[in-house]
Each structure stands twice: as C-alpha cells, then as structure tokens.
C-alpha cells in the first residue's frame, strides 16, 4: 500500500457524503465540493513534498504516469509530468461533466462532483484500465454501470410491489412501458445491428493496433469507444434506416459472422462474435432501461402546494402543459437541467390551479447520479479499473 490510499479514502468519503445529501435533501452541496477541492490541493502539495524527500509513491510502480504525453513511456518519471497529467485529466472531467449537464443528463452538482473526484483520485487508481488521454473515463464508465444497476433495482422493486399491491397509476405505467417497447422494437433491432458492426470494427482495429497500444501505454489501455457507443446509438439507428447505409452495414455484419464461422482464427471466431454480440445486447438493454425510466417510470405525485424550486417536471406533467403552448414558450420558458426556478414554480402552480388540473402534480424522481458516483468511485478504487471488462 502506497501513500495514494489517503486521497482515495477521501474521495470515497466525499462521494458517500454527497450521495447521502442527494438522497436526503435532493442536492449536492457546494461546501462539500469545496472541501474536496481543498483536500485535492493539500494532497498534491503533500505528494510533492513526500516525493522530494524520497518517499515511495505510485510512480515507483508505474513510472509512465510521470512522463509527458509526447515522451517515450520508458523515460524516467518526472513529478511535473504527473501533475500535468492530473491537471489535464481534471480539465477533461470538467468538460465531460459540463457536457452531460448541458444535454440535461445530470444536474450541475453531479457534474461538479465528478470533476472534483477526478482531481482527488490519484492516476494510479486506474492502473488496471489506464487510458492516457482521459484516465477518469473509467470512473465515468463505472458510474453509468452503477446507474444501470440502480435503475434495474428500482424497476424490479416497483414490479414486485405492483404484483403484490397493484395501483391504477402503476398499471398505466407498465402498460405504457410495453407500448414503448413495441413502438421502438424496429429502431432497437436496427440499432443492434449497427452497434454490432461498430463493435466488430473496433475489435479489428484493436487487434491490428495491439502492438502500438502496448508500446505507447504499458498500463492496460482499453479505448473509450465502447462508452461512446452508448452515445451514438440513437443517431446511428436513425442513420441505419437509410437503405444505402443500413443494407451495406447489415450485409457486412453478416459476412463478418460467416467468415468467423467458416474461417476461424485465434482472434476471430464464433466465440469472438458471441462476446461482441453480448456487449451489443448490453448496450441495447442499457438504453432500453434508461429510456423506459426517463419516458415512462420517472414520475412522483406530490401536492401542488408542495411544488418547489429545483424540482424537475415528469413527462406526464410536460404532456399536460403542451395544451397551453403560450405557457410553455413564454410564461414558463425553458426549464434547465437543475429544475424549476422560483418564478417558474410559482407560475406553474398558479396555472395548474386556475386550469383545474387537480390537487396533485407529477415531478421527476431524477436518476440517482450522486449515489451512482459513490458506487463508481468505490468500484474504481477497489478494482483499479472497470467493473466489466470490454476487451
């Protein structure tokens, strides 16, 4: 055990604290994040002093962490290079977190928490799956796996509860879920073929570039392409609907499978195809669960007078509001990823009461990203890489 266990423990503590405040209060507090940034600054200063006096660090085991991006990985480690990598990783984590916030995938507090954790965790935390360009991609990957696990768990609990003590509202939700799956079956099938094709292309490129990857990244280095496939699924499936794209891709995929079946090699055989197919199915299942949660199950009924700032409207409520487009476009305006403002909450409350929409309104439960970040941090530190290996 090296000195790096100290910031790792602090990162787990911060992520756990933010998970609790998110569950109990529905937010991640800036004071907690500032404390995390202070710990990161103290840690980096302590690391410099420890290294200067000859103390043992992760650079002894992974000297390539202390080389500049343009240097040979076998060069002697330099602390300045390590700090440069830490800064670059934290900057990319901030950009990635901001991007996810911009597209409404998580709240600003979650984005800031991810960037803070990226700065706190030593680069050796990713030793089992190090990607030089953006090491904290591993943390992001594990976090989304944790999100999937939490959503599946919630849907399972709701399914059991509905079977034991059914309610009309929940029955309607499960009926809408079935209709959603039926309505998107074609898109999911087309997307599956496209994802399978891309996986095979990636597998081939990684096979051909294996020596290059080994020479440039002595610590194991899976690429971020697998995670990117989650993001390109929807535009890819739309693109595949065009016959001049979809047909050649389907034919090429079938040809790949046929070639692997009749002319197997150590790198390409039916086992490889089944492995890649399983990963593709995993991508599809993740998106099915994610979209079902967002479009069908993400609702919670509250009294209209309980509506507060920072709450996010459920799809059910947004559908009701569409009957008054003047309210949506002018009076209410855009609702940001962090939820309603105080003025928007008051405007919506008055409209809801004036239009006689009832005593209750549906708001979003929101996806539990802070608890997922805690689980992702814990998995990353304990495993030193991915929970699920993709190579």
Image (spheres, rainbow, N blue to C red):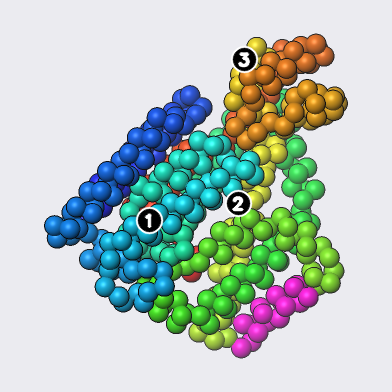
Disc 1 crowd, CA 10 A, few/some/many (<14, 14-19, 20+): many
Q: Nearer the viewer, residue 292 or 350?
A: 350
Q: CA distance from mark 3 to mark 1?
A: 44 Å
Q: Which residue is mark 1?
A: 86
Q: Identify the image quadrant of residue 67.
A: bottom left
Residue 258 on the magenta span: yes
Q: Which residue is mark 3?
A: 306
Q: Nearer the viewer, residue 135 or 367?
A: 135
Q: Which residue is mark 2?
A: 286
Residue drawn at 63 percent across, 82 percent down: 261
Residue 260 screen position, x and y as percent: 62, 82
Identify the secondary structure beneath mark 2. Answer: helix
Q: Identify the image quadrant of residue 249.
A: bottom right
Q: Which residues are magenta?
A: 248-263
Q: CA distance from mark 1 to mark 2?
A: 31 Å
Q: CA distance from mark 3 to mark 2?
A: 33 Å
Residue 33 on the magenta span: no
Which one is in front in this view, the residue at disc 1 or the one at disc 2? 1
Magenta segment, prevailing SS (helix, strand or loop) = helix
Most distant residue in the front direction? 80
Disc 2 crowd, CA 10 A, few/some/many (<14, 14-19, 20+): many
From what the image shows, is residue 337 above or below residue 148?
above
Residue drawn at 49 percent across, 48 percent down: 94
From what the image shows, is residue 160 above or below residue 9?
above
Q: From this viewpoint, is residue 189 visible?
A: no
Which one is in front in this view, the residue at disc 3 or the one at disc 2? 3
């Amino acid at each position: 055990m090296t000195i790096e266990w100290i910031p790792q423990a602090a990162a787990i503590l911060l992520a756990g604290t933010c998970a609790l405040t998110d569950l109990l209060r529905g937010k991640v507090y800036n004071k907690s994040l500032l404390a995390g940034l202070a710990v990161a600054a103290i840690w980096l200063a302590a690391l410099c002093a420890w290294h200067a006096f000859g103390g043992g660090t992760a650079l002894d085991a992974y000297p390539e962490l202390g080389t500049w991006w343009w240097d040979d990985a076998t060069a002697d480690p330099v602390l300045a290079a390590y700090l440069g990598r830490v800064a670059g990783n934290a900057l990319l984590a901030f950009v990635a977190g901001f991007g996810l916030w911009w597209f409404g995938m998580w709240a600003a507090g979650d984005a800031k928490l991810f960037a803070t954790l990226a700065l706190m965790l030593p680069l050796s935390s990713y030793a089992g799956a190090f990607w030089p360009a953006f090491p904290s991609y591993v943390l992001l990957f594990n976090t989304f796996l944790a999100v999937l696990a939490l959503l599946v768990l919630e849907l399972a609990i709701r399914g059991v509860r509905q079977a034991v003590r059914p309610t009309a509202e929940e029955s309607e939700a499960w009926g809408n879920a079935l209709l959603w799956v039926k309505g998107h079956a074609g898109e999911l099938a087309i997307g599956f073929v496209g994802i399978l094709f891309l996986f095979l292309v990636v597998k081939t490129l990684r096979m051909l570039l294996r020596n290059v990857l080994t020479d440039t990244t002595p610590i194991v280095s899976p690429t971020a392409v697998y995670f990117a496939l989650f993001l390109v699924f929807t535009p890819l499936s739309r693109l595949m609907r065009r016959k001049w794209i979809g047909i050649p891709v389907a034919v090429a995929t079938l040809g790949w499978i046929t070639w692997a079946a009749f002319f197997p090699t150590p790198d390409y055989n039916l086992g490889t195809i089944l492995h890649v197919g399983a990963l593709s199915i995993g991508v599809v299942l993740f998106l099915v669960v994610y979209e079902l949660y967002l479009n069908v199950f993400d609702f919670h009924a509250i009294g209209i007078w309980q509506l507060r700032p920072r709450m996010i409207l459920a799809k059910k409520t947004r559908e009701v509001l569409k009957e008054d487009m003047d309210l949506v476009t002018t009076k209410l305006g855009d609702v940001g990823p962090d939820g309603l403002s105080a003025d928007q909450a008051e405007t919506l409350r008055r409209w809801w009461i004036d239009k006689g929409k009832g005593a209750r309104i549906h708001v979003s439960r929101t996806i539990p990203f802070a608890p997922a970040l805690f689980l992702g941090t814990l998995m990353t530190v304990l495993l030193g890489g991915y929970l699920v290996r993709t190579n």
